[in-house]
Amino acid sequence: MGGHFQARPSVGASARAGDALWAAARLVRAALALTFRRLILANKIFTFVTVFCFVATLAAVAAASDEKVNSVGARFVLIPAGTFMMGLDRDARGVLGDEVPRHRVTVSKAFYLGKYEVTQAEWRKVMGENPSSFKGDANPVETVSWEDAQAFIEKLNQMEGTARYRLPTEAEWEYAARAGSELPFISGDDETDLGRFAWHEDNAFYSSHPVGEKEPNAWGLHDMIGNVWEWAFDWHGRDYYAQSPETDPQGPPEGERRICRGCAWLSGVLACRFTDRLANEPDVRGDFLGFRLAFDVEER
Ligand SMILES: [Ca+2]
């Protein structure tokens, strides 16, 4: 029996073993708690970083938003910088002399361009009157000359305390109208589906129409083709494409007529190619002549 007793641990030894086990358990529990707290802390940090990144991304997107709205309610789309082929090949169907040669152009800076033509409501808010023939607040303003457009731009700039508004250059206009397309029409290789995107001779019933009723191009711009022709900044040069700089061409330094782009409600389909160039003296007004605004992305 004595051996039996001796084979069992003594009460003292048992208590020490229990203490050791208890201490080990506490250590394990403490280690687990620490690990758990670290996991919670790590999780909190992870959550914080995730939320911070999300908010920062939202702020960045808002700061360089794809769309902006100005003081008279005009909407603008951010057009990315890029390179495209401007003009038409010499053997293209219906090609005109001033559309050639097809040549590489780089628009070196992103810019904002009106999502729609300037409307009559916007014009009236700035100029206090409405010269248009086809009346309608949402219709594009027309019967405005290139000089009238400059007067509107000057007054809008004054109203907003800025100098940012301007007409797009001809290259910016064609680049934005194409929105990546290398085909001759906004509807593709030919004019079969042109009516989805544009008011022109065959569907406009000899009138302008409210902006934005037709489908936009791939960059969200409406009525780049059709509705009213749009004044661009440039002087017209018949042979300009053969000598223009590859980067940010601005048109010839002087001339007699300013460029208009994009065809109108009275235009036949061939004038509704991306490349067709109309030109008018800068004081000419017509019920088929309007414009859209551009402005640069602010430098930071
Ligand atoms: Ca147009």
Image: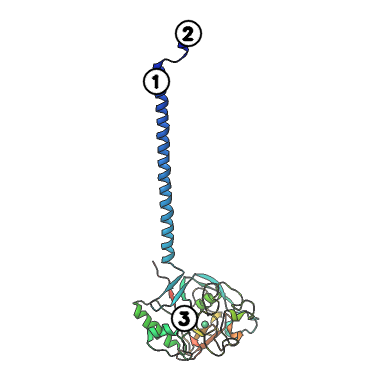
Q: Are marks 1 and 3 in contact (CB under 8 Å)?
A: no
Q: What residue would you read off at disc 3?
A: 292
Residue 199 % position (x, y):
56, 84
**Structural distance between the alpha carbons of marks 1 and 3:** 91 Å
Q: SS of the residue at dot 1?
A: helix
**Structural distance between the alpha carbons of marks 1 and 2:** 22 Å
Residue count near mark 3 (Cα–Cα under 10 Å), binned few <14, some 14–19, many ≥20: many
Q: Is ligand 1 within 8 Å of the beta carbon of the residue shown at mark 3? A: yes
Q: Is residue 48 above or below residue 212?
A: above
Residue 214 can be seen in this image = yes
Q: Is ligand 1 within 8 Å of the beta carbon of the residue shown at mark 1? A: no
Going from N to C along the chain, the mark reached first, 1 or 3, is: 1
Q: What residue would you read off at disc 1?
A: 15
Tell me the kind of residue under disc 3: Arg
Q: Which of these two is toward me, 51 or 117?
A: 51
Q: Is residue 80 above or below residue 153?
A: above
Going from N to C along the chain, the mark reached first, 2 or 3, is: 2
Quadrant of the image occupied by residue 100? bottom right
For the C terminus, the quadrant is: bottom left
Q: What residue would you read off at disc 2?
A: 1
Left or right: residue 46 versus residue 270 is: left
Residue 176 % position (x, y):
52, 75
Tell me the kind of residue under disc 2: Met
Residue 175 % position (x, y):
53, 75
**Structural distance between the alpha carbons of marks 2 and 3:** 109 Å
Q: Which of these two is toward me, 23 or 172?
A: 23
Residue 33 % position (x, y):
41, 37
Mark 1 or 3: in front is 1
Tell me the kind of residue under disc 1: Ala
Question: How many labels, in total?
Answer: 3
Residue count near mark 2 (Cα–Cα under 10 Å), binned few <14, some 14–19, many ≥20: few
Q: SS of the residue at dot 2?
A: loop
